[in-house]
Image (cartoon, helix red, strand yellow):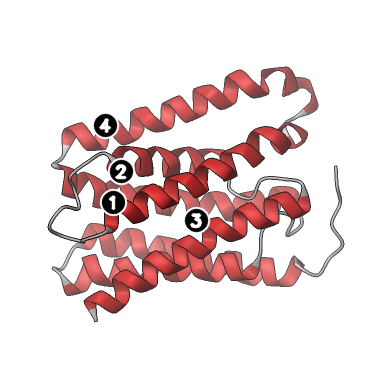
Amino acid sequence: MQLFLILLSGICWSIVYIELVRKGIKDKTYGMPLFALGLNFAWEVIYSFSDAFEGVFPGQRAVTIAWAVLDAFIIVTYFYYGKQHFPERARKYFIPFSILAFASCFVIQFAFFFHFTPVVAAKYSAFAQNAAMSVLFLTMLFQRGSARGQSVLMAVCKWLGTLAPTILFGVIYAFDIYVILLGIVCSVFDILYIVMLAKWQEEPLVYA
């Protein structure tokens, strides 16, 4: 069961990133909200160079590096297409604000990393950012009013990719109320996101 959940999470999140790159290029936009992207990328970069997973999940470092590379492609779509989604009066601040946002996300992730042991930091920060990510994806969908840059496949894989480690770290390894509560928050918003995305995905895209 443990191996199954680990593989399920790894495969699902890989599909999420690939779909976001594919849909971003196809729809001429970016598919992951800015702060979700920043926190995600910062986590992957930090734990690509950390020994947090050594002896716990063999091969996880290689997977984390692969995720960071895929996220880098999503970042490219963000900087290439993102300005169109900025308020018109603030578009001249798009680049400096975006850089500040990414820098702030690294600071937040380093706060976890330096305060906790690497293994605890990796787990707790991952669930915190996933909860934020679930809220941000649904918010972005409402703001855009269309499924542009996103897909139901990505949304379902995102939900399963977080649900699997919630069960693994919150129940199987040890009872962890922090993981369980944040996992519940993720599932609630992820399911709402899937339902709304499925409802809107067939609507014509508007290329602003």
Q: Earlier in the sequence, mark 2 or mark 3?
A: 2
User: Mark 4 = which residue?
Assistant: 111
Rendered image quadrant of residue 145: bottom right
Q: Which amino acid does label 2 sit on?
A: Ser
Between the residue at mark 4 and the residue at mark 2, the CA separation in whole angstroms equals 17 Å
Three-letter residue code for mark 4: Ala
Q: Which mark is residue 61?
A: 1
Q: Residue 132 carries which label?
A: none
Q: Read off the residue under disc 3.
A: 134
Of marks 4 and 2, the one in the foreground: 2
Q: Is residue 139 above or below residue 158?
A: above
Mark 2 Cα within 10 Å, few/some/many (few <14, many 20+)?
many
Q: How crowded is mark 4: few (under 14 residues within 10 Å), some or many (20 or more)?
A: few
Work out whether residue 29 can be spotted. Answer: yes
Percent x, y for residue 25? 72, 50
Q: Badges 2 and 3: C-beta atoms under 8 Å apart?
A: no
Residue at horizontal 69 percent and vertical 72 percent from the top: 198
Mark nearest the camera among 2 and 3 is 2
Question: In the rendered image, which residue does mark 2 sit on?
Answer: 48
Q: Which of marks 4 and 1 is nearer the N terminus?
A: 1
* SS at circle 2: helix
Q: Residue at x 76, y 66 (%)?
A: 200
The C terminus, quarter of image:
top right
Picture coordinates of residue 132 (x, y %)? 45, 48
